[in-house]
Structure formats: C-alpha cells, structure tokens
Amino acid sequence: MLTENPFAALTGTIPATAMQIYVIAMMILVIGGTVLDMIHKKSAKYFFANAENAKKSATRTVGGGEKVGLAVKTLTSEVLTSSEFSNPKRRISHLLSMYGFIAFVLSSAVMVFAYTGAGVETPAIWPILWHLGALSLAIGGYWFWFGIRVDVVSEGKSPFSLDRADLFIVSLLGVSTFGLIWSFLQSINAGILTTAFLVLFIIASTVLFGGVMWSKFAHMFFKPAAAYQKKVTVADGSRENLPAPADRNDPADRDRHSMELLKDAPMDMGLGIKRESPNHY
C-alpha cells in the first residue's frame, strides 16, 4: 500500500488525462477563489493602503538588504515554523497539518502528471510521501478538531457541531481520511467499497479547493505578506501608528502609567489566566 501509486491503478477506469484536467481545475479554483476572497474582503486594498499610510509616519528608510533580511525572517519564522503560535500544542498541530498538506498535494500532482502513463513505474518515494502526508494531515487535523478548538475546549460545545467556519478543517480531514481509506481498500481489492471511498475522496477534495472563498484557505497566502509588512513597519518606525513597547527602565515610560500601583510593578507578573487550562465552562 505505502509504495503503490493509488492514481496509477485508476487508469483502467479513469483516463490519466481526466485526472490531470481535474487537478488543473482545482488549481484554477484555488487561484480564482483566493482572488475573489481578496476582492470580497478588500484585504489586498487594505494591505496596500496600510503600507502607504505607514510610509507617511516612518522615521527611517528601510534599505533593500534589510527588506530581504526581513523577508527571510518572515519565511523562517511565521511561515516555516509558525512561531506566532504561543500555544505549543496548537503550533505542533498546525505544523503537522501544514507539512502534511504540502507533501500530500505535491506528491499527488507529481504522481498524476508524471506516473499515470501505461508501463510507467512510480518511484517509491512519491507514494510513501503521499501516504505520510495524508497521515500527518489527519493527525494534526484531528488533534485540532477534538482537543484544541476554542469553542470545544473553553465553551463546552460538542466536537461534532458544525458551522460554515469549519468548512476548511472538515474538508481537510475528509481529504486525508477518505484518501487513506481509499488507498487501503484499493490495495486489497475491496470492490464497491473502493469506489465509494474514491467518490468521497473526490467530493472532499472538490469542497476543499472549490470552497476557498468561504474558508481559511486564502488566509494561507495573505498571512505571510501581512507578517512581512508588520516587520517592515517596526523597522521603519511607523509601527502601524502604534506606540513603541514600554520600557520600565525609562523614567518617561514608567511615569506615564495611569496607575501609581503599576509604575514600579515587575514586567513579568506571573502566568495570570494561563495558570490553568480554560475548562471552566
């Protein structure tokens, strides 16, 4: 199972060309959905307007070399390691899902376009990457769904309650789960069950890539740009028109505090609400 290309076995039923057209259609849906999402939410317009406003209040010019450094820092921090998550469980879950999804989609495209021809043997690395990617995506997704979601952990809601906001994660779980089950059933020649889970896999994939405008999918493309822009505003001094972080060692910062009691209080005042898990619903 792990070393078998699940798409190559389909060529007897579904032509390789049809599978390739489907993959291209899903790519078009992602691009189109992302553009429509940006137009609908006006996120791109806000992004560029915010950047122009920041330039007006900048106190220094950020050079090209410094911008490259900030872009690299954004890539290695927010993108590759998701350092913005302070909750380690949420961060690990996100990384498992993200890298699993990338491995799953990349290996799917490679196997569909390069290794579905007659007599073409698929290198073992691609099916292995496909299965491990789906498994990583499932682990990260189910961990998030049953153990990390805020409304489940903090508000005592049923983990099986569904809203439109859950479209992205539910379709992700469907793709990984149905894909793994379909591959297993295909390896043991389960007949009609194999076809049933193939249909479910295709439906979940279509919902995932076709529902970009109504899910968090587009957020994955906008988030790195927003993180980079935030670093630029800190570097040029504009700080999005927000004050600089207070420095208790600076008398001017210490004395401007509105509460006398807190002027000499330590910066680290303990865990506060983080002392216990939010289970008091």
Image (cartoon, grey):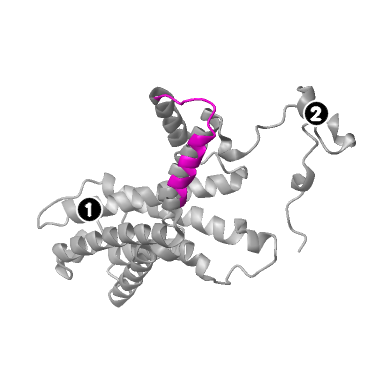
Residue 132 appears in the rendering: no
Q: Earlier in the sequence, mark 2 or mark 1?
A: 1
Disc 2 vs disc 1: which is toward the camera?
A: 2
- At a point 20% along the width and 65% down the height, the residue shown is 10
Q: Where is residue 254 shown, x and y percent of the image?
A: 80, 28
The amino acid at mark 1 is Met
Q: Which residue is mark 2?
A: 254
Q: Quadrant of residue 24?
A: bottom left
Q: Is residue 56 magenta?
A: yes
Residue segment shown in magenta? 46-63
Q: Quadrant of residue 211?
A: bottom left
Cα distance in 3D space between marks 2 and 1: 62 Å
Residue 59 appears in the rendering: yes
Q: Where is residue 186 shown, x and y percent of the image?
A: 28, 66
Callout 2 touching callout 1 (CB < 8 Å): no
Q: Quadrant of the C terminus?
A: bottom right
Q: Where is residue 65 shown, x and y percent of the image?
A: 39, 23
